[in-house]
Amino acid sequence: MLARAVLRTIDFAIRRAWFVVVISISLTLASIVYATTHFALNTDIDTLISPDLSWRKTETAFAAAFPRFDLLLVVVSAPTSELAEQANSALSEALSKRTDRFRSVSRLPVGEGYFERQGLLFQSPEELANTTKELIEAEPIIHDLSADPSLRGITDGLTDAIMGVQSGKLKLDALAYPMNKAADTIEDILAGRPASFSWQALAQGRPAEPRELRRFINVRPILDYGALEPGLVARETIRQTAAELDLNSKYQANVRITGTVALFDEEFATVKEGAALNATVTVAIVLLILWWALRSARIIFAVFANLVVGLSITAAVGMMMTSTLSLISVYFAVLFVGLGVDFGIQFSVRYRHERHKIRKLRPALLETGKRVGAPLTLAAAAVAAGFFSFLPTDYRGVSELGLIAGFGMLIAFFTSITLLPALLALLKAPAEGKPLGFSALAPVDRFMERHRIPIIAITGLVVVAGLPLLYWVRFDFNPMNLRSPKVESVAAYLELTKDPDAKNNTIEMLAPSLADADRAAVKLSAIPQVSGVATLSSLVPDRQQEKLALIKQIANKLNSALKPPDAQPPPTDAQNIEALNDEAGRLTEIAEGQNGPGAVAARRLSVDLAKLASSDQQMRARASAVFIAPLKTAFQLLSNLLKAQPVSVKTLPLDIVRDWQLPDGRTRVEVTPKGNVNDDDKALEDYTRAVLAVEPSATGGPVTILESGRTVVSAFIQAGFWAILSIATLLWITLRRIGDVLLTLVPLALAGVVTLEVCGLFGLPLNYANIIALPLLLGVGVAFKIYYIMAWRAGQTNLLQSSLTRAVTFSALATATAFGSLWFSSHPGTASMGRLLALSLVSTLAAAVLFQPVLMGKPRDTSNPTLPARSSVPRARAARVHLSGARPRAAKRGRGRR
């Protein structure tokens, strides 16, 4: 019945060709106008997974209480901690004024001023005792530098250190590090290179660690989710502000932007990068493949026009059904081109085959419709059913894609039996001079027929032998592996993951009260995979009285040194020259007769001081700025640390309390993993599962990664089950033989298993992006298998050399081109999708072309009138006679008697 309906539709399209073309053009124009005027892209990734899942509800509730997922993290780095602090302060102050671009701007950690004052209280008593001793011993140098913050004052401070060596309190080698650092800086200044000096590093006696050279600003931008990059305007504002402040020249500062918003923005930009070029190359290659397959410009034009019309209508229908496209559903266009072109190629290749036998155009088109109508209908229905199977899943992004792609397959089928034959009728493509197919493959056909059983056995053994490879097939749950490490946001993020203080991969939860939070912290701290647990109570130092006594001791000694009553007026340039030369002489004197590292450093610094003294005034002014500016910052930080006061939960600053506790008392608990779990997916998963086992209400990045992976995998398993069930049911209704259904599904299953085995062999993991290849394998594979089973049921032999194999091969090439173009994307996730799509397509093509004909064997004997294939022949012949315009009375009487 369906075959007759398709045949009548094709006959109508041929007889009313201009009407069909005009209607198609009108629908296309209307669809393009509708799609372009209603196009909306929702780049909010939170909408890709159903919000009704329990873990999503927990995540949403926590995000409402403590918003953390719409942030930009500005990373300010500089050669010294002082320069980083100065640049960070200037930038955060400027950004806070841009209320038109940002909802909030805050320096990290939250309550930074609190830690600047109370920082010493967070040291252990033993550490603070050592700090006390060192600062008290440095009091003379601090006094000299505070009283005279100039090159002269610096030389006075160095003189104090030399006197300590002369008195035996210090060893000259102990001054090697600070003297070498000073010499490095002066040499950079004299050479005209960027120069910096850190007094904090000097006090620590070691170079600053990378984490000490970074400062952070937390920015909550105003986002535009209708744009491909919602945070683009905000990011450009940050960069423009940094440029206007001239942070690079003033502080040698580098500003980078990361955070959730930047990561997703730049991921979208990476996906877009080169997309136009890839699309152009893809279209060109598809046209070339169509030429190889069809060898007629008129037929190629018809197929390509059919594809454009179908894609336009599908886009409009998709916008009507979803209103906005997600970052996954937008791939419907690639799917339509890759799968929709198959119907056009199948119809056109069969038309060429029939046109070689039937010289007249209209009968050839009708015979084509009779031959391909049922296979195309069944293939379109099966592919659509496969896509529609994603509708009930919780993976909304793929669910929407399945909805649009499913209807797209039906639209592609409908245009292929209306517009395509109408265009072929109007364009009047010439008759074929020689038969189609791959006659050169005749020996292969005969070989496969003679060795059918060994081929099946060997294929089965090879596939079974490869089953252990499935053990190495893994799902990559880490979304960072799908992003390009070359983009700024990802590079900055990966750098921060190596910093234990950056608190990456923290898991968080809400406790009803602070007391409950502290009890939860005790339980969570016992987990082996956890390195630390923080609550609001963690911000209150212990043993405060003991530590405050030591800080008071430091303050009594240093307060007068930091604000000396004998402060001197700025020196003249001549006084600076004199001081530099005097200090150069003292250094030469103290190093005389010695060969240790301290003596070597002293002689080196002596030469450099003498060179600086003999240079021009501008060079000394630059040296003064390089040494003195960070000195003032260091003294300010030291002064703040000496202002520590007793603190309790009740006296914590409000901004800190708001970051940890809600007005109703609910309190945040923060769990940090042990080690860098970013480099070990198994460790990240174990850590997350261990925390969830203790606190099932926990949320955060690792929980989202784990649960998202579960949801995605579950969605594909669920959709795969429904797809196979619906396709099997459809095949049973159509084919009415369990054996024929199995002959269609077994090669499909074989292709799927081989694809996964190759993934295990070459270490190609499944991920959120490339897992979409599995339903595509199902769609393409079932279509190819249906073509062969229907041809086999019709009694066709030598399938490998037939025009059907020609159509399937070139269809697969066109599909591979559409999908394979993704392989060359600069976005790793999209590239992995292209790789797996290409692999799955090769597997399914081999299963259809090489294995399925062998599995089916020789066609059944259709001479038995009880077989379905035989009983359908008179009906098909009657339909062909009727549609050709001949209406013999005997035929009518015959139908009436039946």
Image (cartoon, rainbow, N blue to C red):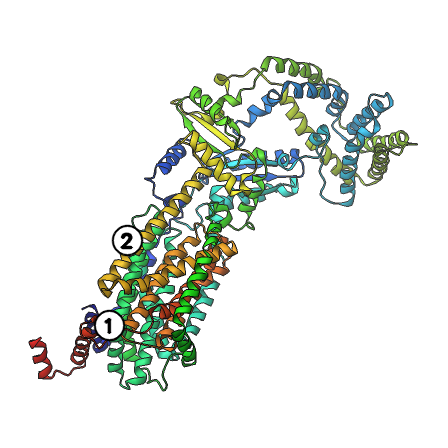
- Position in image of residue 165 (x %, y %): 84, 24
Q: Earlier in the sequence, mark 1 or mark 2?
A: 1
**Mark 2 surroundings within 10 Å by alpha-carbon count, few (fewer than 14), some (14 through 19), many (20 or more):** few
Locate residue 787: give its quadrant: bottom left
> Any mark on residue 321, and which?
2
**Mark 1 surroundings within 10 Å by alpha-carbon count, few (fewer than 14), some (14 through 19), many (20 or more):** many
For the question of whether residue 814 can be seen, the reply is no
Kind of residue sitting beneath label 1: Val
**For residue 872, side relative to residue 198 (left or right):** left
- Position in image of residue 732 (x %, y %): 24, 61
**For residue 584, side relative to residue 104 (left or right):** right
Q: Which secondary structure, mark 1?
A: helix
Locate residue 349: give its quadrant: bottom left
Q: Is residue 281 above or below residue 435?
A: above
For image coordinates 38% across by 77% down, the residue present is: 801
> Any mark on residue 20, and which?
1
**For residue 158, side relative to residue 264 (left or right):** right
